[in-house]
Image: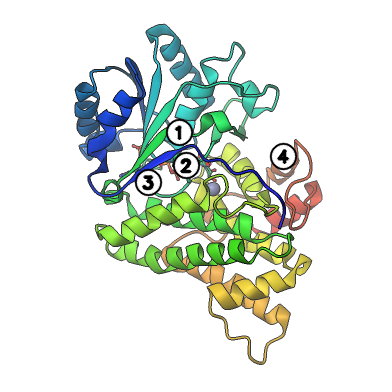
Amino acid sequence: MNSFDFHNPTKILFGAGKLEQLGEQVAACGSKTVLLVYGGGSIKKTGLYDRVLTQLAGAGVRTVELPGVEPNPRVTTVRKGIELCRAEGVDLILAVGGGSVIDAAKAVAVGVPYEGDVWDFLMRKAKITAALPLGTVLTLSATGSEMNGNAVITNWEEKRKKSFASIYAYPKFSILDPTLTYTVPADQTVNGIVDMMSHVFEQYFSLTPDTPLQERLCESILQTIIENGERALAEPEQYEVRANLMLCGTYALNGGMISVGVQTDWATHAIEHEVSAIYDIAHAAGLSVLFPNWMKYVYASRPDRFVQFAVRVWNIDPAGKSDEEIALAGIQATRDYFTRIGAPARLADLGIGDSEIGRMAKEAVKFGPIGSFKVLHEDDVKAILQLSL
Ligand code: NZQ
Ligand code: ZN
């Protein structure tokens, strides 16, 4: 196991009815003016918007709004939010939505105290050194953004989707009420399942030796997602099922719970971000296509980890099989599960051909080779994209 520092400053308020504590949390931040950030209107349809405004009114704060955050949030929207904060003297940002809304809110938060253009942070031209405080109300279990310091932002004009990670971008508090995810449509529930499983994969497939606890935590999270994923699709308003998925999503990517002491990979995410940068597909749709192909491409780097994955996560019976057969059976089980829940298997299913493969591969390694389980260069990325057509 590697040495590590782990500090996660986000306070989590988890459970049915926790939204009623929003006003208290806002008041505890000492805020006078809040920027309320939300997406394309789902919170208005579900009635959550009114409930949030009631809480904010109760806290005695003035509210300014940044609506319309896009899935795959755009830097143009972030810039609008930064301007609003400066003009209105905003001192707290409140994101109400899924990963896109929270990520956009984080980018606004770090952009306000910075004199240059916020896109500099995404292009690694500047270091984040300050941020406005941020609170979140999560409405979709998927990214873990509610308890981590990451944001992924798209520059549509440049056809680039890039991320930053900063201790300054962790939310001060996040309200996780599973009942708020009852209205998530089936396709977005599927996306959430695939995304959180992919986050575990990025941290589980590691060359770091002697990490039995981290491995078993990963395997438990994966099994819990697998068991509850199909149930959430069949019974979208079952509290325990939605609660289990929500906790899995948060644990799967919260800056350390399963990654401490482990060298993580993240190559597949880097490749996927290039696909959604150009084609504007859902992040998880890209992951569903790419991950099993990444697995096929890299499993020989450490077959024993793939054997363990197959046996412990997918209950593959190893009797009479070679290590390679067991590993491949685990990869096939992953593909079959994604297919069973309705996630895509090929880029062609998303209407994507081979015309931009060169560009996507080049961008994916823009800041250097990616991955650690197997270090990937431009040609490797091209090969994985070709396998995925
Ligand atoms: O925009 P609204 O109207 O709110 O509708 C959203 C959106 O259309 C809808 N939705 C959310 N909650 C709902 C709901 N509809 C009904 N009822 C609810 N309760 O769902 C749609 C998708 O929302 P979005 O926020 O885009 O989904 P997700 O949470 O999957 O976030 C995806 C974004 O996060 C990034 C992805 O790249 C993508 O841009 N990621 C962020 C990460 C992070 N910050 O750590 C890590 C991830 O790997 C990922 O890259
Ligand atoms: Zn992801």
Residue type, mark 3 in image? Leu
- Which SS class for mark 4? helix
Which mark lies nearer to you, 2 or 3? 2
> Is residue 383 visible from the viewing direction of this image?
yes
Q: Earlier in the sequence, mark 3 or mark 1?
A: 3
Q: Which residue is mark 3?
A: 140
Q: Which residue is mark 2?
A: 147
Which mark lies nearer to you, 4 or 3? 3
Q: Nearer the viewer, residue 312 or 385?
A: 312
Q: Nearer the viewer, residue 191 or 180?
A: 180
Q: Residue at x 59, y 78 (%)?
A: 311
Q: Nearer the viewer, residue 266 or 379?
A: 266
Outermost residue, top direction?
Answer: 87
Outermost residue, bottom direction?
Answer: 320
Ligand number 1: quarter of image? top left
Ligand 1 within 8 angstroms of badge 3 C-beta: yes
Q: Are marks 2 and 4 in contact (CB under 8 Å)?
A: no
> Within 10 angstroms of label 4, few (less than 14), some, or many (20 or more) residues?
some
Q: Is residue 324 left or right of residue 8?
A: right
Q: Are marks 1 and 2 in contact (CB under 8 Å)?
A: yes
Q: Earlier in the sequence, mark 2 or mark 4?
A: 2
Q: Which residue is mark 4?
A: 359
Q: Which residue is mark 1?
A: 171
Whole-percent x and y of residue 194? 49, 57
Distance CA(mark 4)–CA(mark 3) = 31 Å
